[in-house]
Image: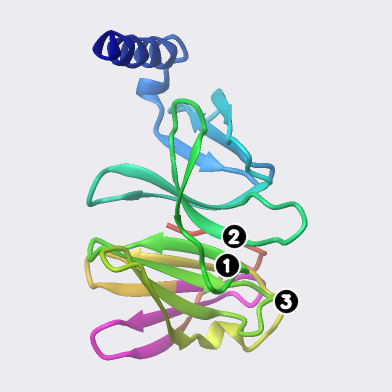
């Protein structure tokens, strides 16, 4: 009976996705209202799923170790606390992976080294604090405080670069890109042009 129910769930999920053409979609995003969007190639049409219990979403990425979707979302309307969840794209359900000690996470990304890198937001006591979460041990540590935190009030985006195993932090409104070398523990500031806006995510 359990096998039949499992098969029914799998095939019904495939049916839902096939009917909405999600198999040809290329862009998946999470918005500040806690909705998950699947955009088609032309990005003019999308399929939307509400994330269960989410008040707002702040980061979305795939774990290369298991190819599952992970998200940093807020589920408490009173605390603003943002934590790491595994996200089921079929029904929007959440499974808590880690409760960050630093509650005010701005955004995050995961590396192919099995670690999540999260940067704290403006309301944090340590703006632009970069936290490292080892998924194998669930150990969270403050890796360093980025120079992207010098101007409190600016947005920040973080991306793990698998080609050079570095962290890329873009500081919105100041149009600055910071590159942190994980091997040498050094951060370099690169000034860009034409991106002078409050960007919260880069890739």
Question: Which portion, as a residue range, is magenta?
Answer: 169-188
Q: Are marks 2 and 1 in contact (CB under 8 Å)?
A: yes
**On screen, residue 16 above or below 185:** above
Displayed quadrant of residue 53: top right
Front one among 118 and 193: 118
Number of labels in the image equals 3
Question: Disc 3 versus disc 1: distance between alpha carbons?
Answer: 14 Å
What residue would you read off at disc 2? Answer: 82
In the displayed structure, does residue 151 sit left or right of residue 165?
right
Decide: few, some or many residues near mark 3? Use Cα within 10 Å; few <14, some 14-19, many ≥20: some
Q: Main secondary structure of the magenta part?
A: strand
**On screen, residue 82 above or below 168:** above
Task: Tell me, for residue 116, which label it has, or none.
Answer: none
Q: Earlier in the sequence, mark 2 or mark 1?
A: 2
What residue would you read off at disc 1? Answer: 105
Looking at the figure, which quarter contains the C terminus?
bottom left
């Amino acid at each position: 009976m359990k096998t039949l129910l499992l098969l029914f769930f799998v095939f019904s999920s495939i049916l839902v996705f096939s009917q909405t053409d999600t198999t040809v979609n290329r862009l998946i995003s999470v918005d500040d209202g806690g909705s998950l969007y699947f955009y088609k190639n032309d990005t003019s049409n999308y399929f939307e799923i509400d994330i269960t219990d989410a008040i707002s979403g702040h980061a979305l990425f795939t774990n290369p170790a298991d190819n599952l979707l992970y998200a940093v979302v807020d589920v408490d309307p009173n605390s603003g606390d943002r934590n790491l969840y595994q996200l089921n794209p079929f029904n929007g359900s959440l499974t808590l992976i880690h409760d960050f000690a630093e509650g005010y996470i701005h955004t995050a990304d995961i590396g192919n080294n099995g670690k999540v890198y999260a940067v704290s937001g403006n309301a944090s006591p340590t703006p632009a604090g970069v936290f490292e979460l080892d998924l194998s041990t669930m150990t969270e540590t403050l890796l360093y405080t980025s120079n992207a935190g010098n101007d409190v009030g600016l947005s920040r985006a973080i991306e793990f670069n698998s080609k050079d195993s570095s962290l890329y932090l873009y500081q919105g409104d100041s149009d600055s890109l910071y590159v942190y070398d994980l091997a040498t523990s050094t951060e370099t500031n690169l000034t860009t042009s034409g991106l002078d806006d409050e960007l919260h995510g880069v890739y």
